[in-house]
Amino acid sequence: MIHVPRITLGALRLVLLFIGSSLVSHALAAEPSATVRDEIQHLLTDLERSGCQFFRNGEWYGAAEAKEHLNQKYNYLLQKGLVRKSEDFIRLAATESSVSGKAYQVRCKGTEPMPSAVWLDEELSRYREQGRANK
């Protein structure tokens, strides 16, 4: 005679918990909205076109290099499902080095360096305001 193990209530609960947590993590990993993607692409493009320099890990880089670096971090965050708002991108990818923990800075011609988060927040506000004005 073959013995077939019975599923206990506790085991069933564990299976259901696992399935439920998998579904929740999949839902949380959803893509950001089209509006958020557009805003982030605008920020990256605006930084690239700005002619400003970007400070990270003790060195100043050109705007094109800054865009490429932040775009790589953005793509990583997308894979992890960590970007739901443009502010998430700024906070998680564009504020500080994940290697050194030191704050990023932006320096434009004729201005003092400022934290990159401030620079990007200001540009995001301008972009959103411009969008509202055009409606």
Image (spheres, helix red, strand yellow):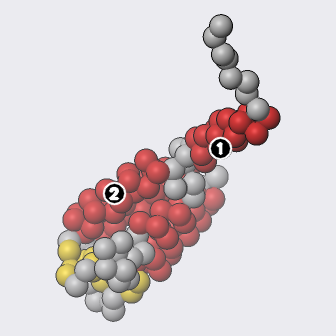
**5 to the left or right of 126:** right
Tag 2 residue: 71
- What residue is rendered at 31% in x and 79% in y? 100
Question: Residue 7 in the image: x percent, y percent?
Answer: 73, 27
Mark 2 and mark 1 in contact? Answer it, CB < 8 Å.
no
**133 to the left or right of 111:** right
- What residue is rendered at 25% in x and 80% in y? 57
Q: Is residue 40 above or below residue 6?
A: below
Q: What residue type is labelled 2?
A: Asn
Q: Which element is circle 2 on?
A: helix
Q: Which element is circle 1 on?
A: helix
Q: Which amino acid does label 1 sit on?
A: Ser
Q: In this view, does 85 lie above or below 110?
A: above
**Where, quadrant-wise, is the N terminus in this rendering?**
top right
Residue 64 visible in image: yes
Q: How many marks?
A: 2
* C-alpha span from label 2 to label 1: 30 Å
- What residue is rendered at 64% in x and 40% in y? 18
Tag 1 residue: 21
**26 to the left or right of 59:** right
Q: Is residue 91 above or below residue 22?
A: below
